[in-house]
Amino acid sequence: MTSISLPRLIGQQLWQQKFAVVLLVACIITALAIVQFAHLNRQLITTQDKLYHERDQLDIEWRNLLLEQRALSEHSRVEDIARHRLNMIRPSGAQDIRVTMP
């Protein structure tokens, strides 16, 4: 009776089924790659959502700044500041001075 060890027997069977082992390893590698790419895809989508949210916040801030700029540059507001804070008055016809260039 010959004694064959189990590891040697498994090794011989695997050696005879090389193609099946290669396919098994390829399947495992492919499965791990799919998991990795799915994880990276989820991370990129999360980053994209954060950037979209930041873009929207900046757009809202920009619109508010435009409204503030329009409000601050209104003619009536400028005239009010000139009259009350700077004590300026609108000159009458006799007070107009024309400056010409030679």
Image: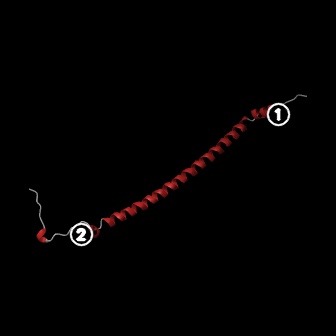
Q: Where is residue 81 in the image (x, y as percent from the top left)?
A: 27, 67
Q: What residue type is labelled 2?
A: Arg
Circle nearer the viewer, 1 or 2 = 2
Any mark on residue 51, and which? none
Quarter residue 80 falls in: bottom left
* Residue at far right of view: 1
Q: Name the residue under label 1.
A: 6
Name the secondary structure under disc 1.
Answer: helix
Q: Residue 83 carries which label?
A: 2
N-term mark: 1 or 2? 1
Q: Which of 82 and 28 is in front in this view?
A: 82
Question: Which amino acid type is marked by label 1?
Answer: Leu
Q: Is residue 8 left or right of residue 74?
A: right
Point out the residue furthest to the left here: 102
Q: Dot 1, crowdedness within 10 Å: few (<14), some or many (≥20)? A: few
> Could you tell me which residue is drawn at 16 percent across and 69 percent down?
91
Q: In which quadrant of the rendered view does residue 79 lie?
A: bottom left
Please report the residue visible at 36 percent of the width from the left and 62 percent of the height from the top.
66
Of residue 46 and residue 80, the one placed in the foreground of this image is: 80
Q: Position of residue 3 (x, y in %)?
A: 87, 29
Residue at the image position 45 percent from the left and 59 percent from the top: 57
Q: Quadrant of the C terminus?
A: bottom left
Disc 2 residue crowd, few under 14, some 14–19, many 20+, Cα 10 Å:
few
